[in-house]
Amino acid sequence: MKVRTRSSAIIGTICLIASLALTTASADESTAPRQAAKVALTKVATAKNPTAGAAGPGGTVWLAERAGTVRVLDRRGLSEPVLDISAETTTDGERGLLGIAFDKKFAHFYISFTNLEGTSTVDEFAVRHGKIRPETRRTVITQTQPYPNHNGGDIKFGPDGYLYIALGDGGSGGDPHGNGQNLDTLLGKLLRIDPHGGKPYAIPRDNPFVDDPKARDEIWAYGLRNPWRFSFDAGTGDLLIGDVGQSAWEEIDWAPASSDGGENYGWSQMEGNHPFREGTEPANHVPPVHEYDRTGLGCSVTGGFVYRGKAIPALRGQYVYSDYCDGTIRSLRIENGKVTGTHDLGVNGGEVISFVQGGNRELYALDIGGSVYRIDRA
C-alpha cells in the first residue's frame, strides 16, 4: 500500500508526521479496491440448449430447454424430461421455452414460452409431491408479439408472493411502435400479477397504475427494451434487471425492495444513460445502476443474481452477471443503489444465456450450447 504524504511545508514535528501517516493510511484502506472473489466453474450437467432454471422441491434445480422440455438436476444428475411442450413452441428467432418458476410453496409450476404463432404465453401447472400434474394446466396470461425477437420471457415470484413477468418491446429494432414508453401495452414492461387471486389472474391493488385509465393495470415498471433476465436479491428483496441494449450500451437496472413500482427505465428515448437517436430523456427516467459499452466483446447482457450462498464468502452480497457474447462472469458490489466495486471473476461460461439460483442460494451458469456450470470457490 502506498501512503500519500503532504508537502514538507506543513511538516512540523515527528508527531504530526506520524499523525498524518496514520490518518492517510486509514483513508487509503477505506478507498482501496477490494479484490475479486476467486471462483471456479464446475460442470455438473449437459442439457439441450438450456435457457432458464429455477430452484425446485427437495433441493433440486429445474432446467428449461429452449425447444420445450424441462429436466430436473439432482445429485444423480440430469433427469429425462418431466415436461415436454416442444410440439407447441418454436425456436425461430429468439423464441422458445424462455422461463420457468415455482411459487413459494412449490404448489404450482409456471412456464413462459412463445407458442407456434409467436405469442408470449405463461401457463400454470399444479404440483403434487414434487411432480407436475399435466391435467391441471391452464393459461394465465398471453401477449401477442409483432416480431420474433425481444420476447423477454423471464418469470419470477417476488418476495411479496406475486408473479413478475418480463416482456420485451416487441422486437425489430429501435422500438418502431414506441412500446417502451406506451403504458397502454404490456410490451417493454415488467408485469406484476396475482395468479391465484382470480381467473385467469388478479391485479394487486397496490400496482402503480391501477388508477390510471390510460395505463395497463398489470404494469410494475416500463421503459425496457429486452429485459431478458431479472431477479430479486434473496437477502434484501431489491430488484435487478439486465436489459439488453440496441447497439451501443448494455444496462443493469436496480430498484430497492421498498419501491412502489412505476419506474421508467427510459427506452426507447434512452439507451442506458444516453439519448437514443436524439431522444429526449424522460423527466422520470431512472438511470441504470451500471452500464457498459460494446467496444469490447460484449453484445447482450445476461442478468444474474446477488450471491447469497455460503460456498464463496468473498462473493457474498455481490451481483453476479455476464454477457452472451463475452461469456466472462463478472460481479458488482452495490451499496445503497450505487455501484462501489466492479470485478472480473476470471472465469468464462461460454455463451451465458442465464443464471439459476438453487434452493441453497448457490448459483449456476447456463451456456446455450449445453453446459451447466455451478459457480464454486476456487
Image (tube, grey):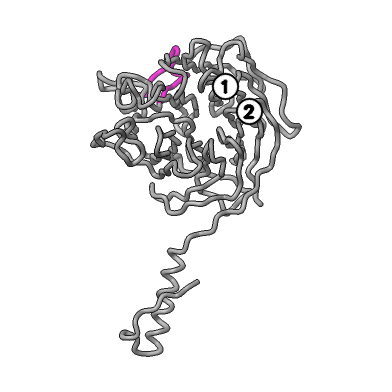
Q: Are marks 1 and 2 in contact (CB under 8 Å)?
A: yes
- Report whether 285 appears left or right of 20: left
What is the tally of numbered marks visible in this picture? Answer: 2
Q: Earlier in the sequence, mark 1 or mark 2?
A: 2
Task: Pinpoint residue 240: horizontal percent, then vertical percent.
Answer: 44, 38
Q: Amino acid at mark 1?
A: Phe
Q: Is residue 306 above or below residue 119?
A: below
Asked whether 197 falls inside the magenta stretch, the response is yes
Q: Camera-side residue: 230 or 93?
A: 93
Q: Amino acid at mark 2?
A: Trp
Mark 1, Cα crowd under 10 Å, few <14 / some 14-19 / many 20+, is: many
Which label belongs to residue 62?
Answer: 2
Quarter of the view holding residue 70? top right
- Report whether 364 appears left or right of 43: left
Q: Camera-side residue: 312 or 205?
A: 312
In the rendered structure, which segment of residues is drawn in magenta? 191-205
Mark 2, Cα crowd under 10 Å, few <14 / some 14-19 / many 20+, is: many
In this view, the mark in front (1 or 2):
2
Asked whether 293 falls inside the magenta stretch, the response is no
User: What secondary structure do most residues of the magenta stretch adopt?
Assistant: loop
Q: Is residue 226 visible?
A: yes
Quarter of the view holding residue 133? top right
Question: Which residue is pictured at 30% across the width and 19% down the height?
Answer: 184
Could you tell me which secondary element the residue under label 1 belongs to? strand
Question: Which residue is pictured at 40% across the width and 27% down the height?
Answer: 190
Q: What residue is shown with label 1?
A: 109
Q: Is residue 108 visible?
A: no
Of all residues, the one furthest to the front in this rendering is 295
- Report whether 39 appears left or right of 188: right
